[in-house]
Image (cartoon, grey):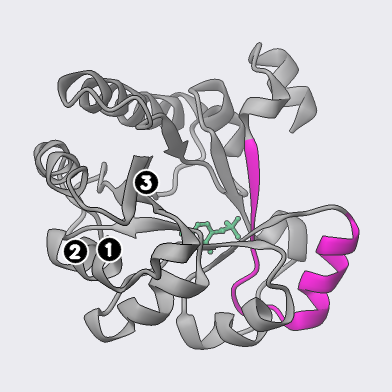
Amino acid sequence: MLKTCEIANRDPDSVNLLAVSKTMGVDAVATAIHAGQKHFGENYLQDARPKVSAFPEATWHFVGGIQSKKTRDIANAFGWVHSITTEKVAKRLSEQREPTLGRLNCLIQVNLSNEDQKSGVTQDEAIRLAGQIATLDQISVRGLMAIPAPTADPAAQAATFRLLRDLKDEIESRHGLPEFNQLSMGMTNDFVEAIKQGATWIRIGTAIFGPRNKP
Ligand SMILES: *Cc1c(COP(=O)(O)O)cnc(C)c1O
């Protein structure tokens, strides 16, 4: 990652490593924390719970699909949510977040490949949703997240990530949101291109923890 930052002329402090610990046990998270890792990503509440309770000092990021009945727990156990796709869920998270915790950092998940089976909103919907979420009390709308269709072609990876960056810039200026400056993009197989294109969070599971246990 340091080497990629050097090649991409990026300040390493501007790229954050999110360790995606989904399906891993408490021990694996403990090892990463002892190595200095501070941010962890989870995509199922049930799977996340024992780890969040064991390590409240870490910052927990929710990166999975959100059911309405889970919003209260997600709003209060996590510091960041990368996977907002509806105003309804954002409203519930805002209403249910304990004010003493401060605002919940939220990213809107965009479906860049426009594949029906992938979750995420269209680019037009993202522009509208950002304006709606920006008015909520207990939420700080911070930027965009995407999980592009996998491809081994670096040029194709770069083109998709550039789309997300341009959309983030457009929303930031159109709605006048100075805090809308985060880009969550890049996983084990495409984080190099993501860093080159401006990622501020790369979400890495396999390259840190090895192959995943079955959920
Ligand atoms: C599992 C997951 C990752 C990590 O994927 P790897 O390819 O193992 O690095 C990143 N982001 C999300 C949303 C995930 O669900």
User: What's the CA distance linking mark 2 and mark 3?
Assistant: 21 Å
- Report if residue 215 is visible in the image: no
Q: Which residues are magenta?
A: 16-35
Q: Which residue is mark 1?
A: 94
Residue 7 visible to the viewer: yes
The amino acid type of the residue labelled 3 equals: Ala
Task: Reply yes or no: does residue 215 show up in magenta.
Answer: no
Dot 2 falls on a residue whose secondary structure is helix
- Which residue appears at 30% of the width and 28% of the height? 168
Q: Quadrant of the C terminus?
A: bottom right
Q: Which numbered disc flags the more N-terminal residue, 2 or 3?
A: 2
Residue at x 63% of width, y 39% of height: 16
Q: Is mark 2 within 8 Å of ligand 1?
A: no
> On the picture, is 18 further left or further right than 38?
left
Residue 146: image tag? 3
Mark on residue 91? 2
Pinpoint residue 151: horizontal percent, then vertical percent.
45, 43
Label 3, secondary structure: give it: loop
Residue 181, label in figure: none
Nearest to viewer (mark 1 / mark 3): 1
Locate the N terminus by quadrant.
top right
Left or right, 85 with reference to 79: left
Amino acid under label 1? Ser
CB under 8 Å between callouts 2 and 1?
yes
Give the mark nearest the N terminus, 1 or 3: 1
Looking at the picture, tell me which residue is in the foreground, 124 or 88: 88
Q: Residues within 10 Å of mark 2 (few under 14, many from 20)?
A: some
In this rendering, is residue 175 above or below 78? above
Q: Which of these two is toward me, 163 or 35? A: 35
Of discs 2 and 3, which sits in the foreground? 2
Q: In which image quadrant can residue 24 be found?
A: bottom right
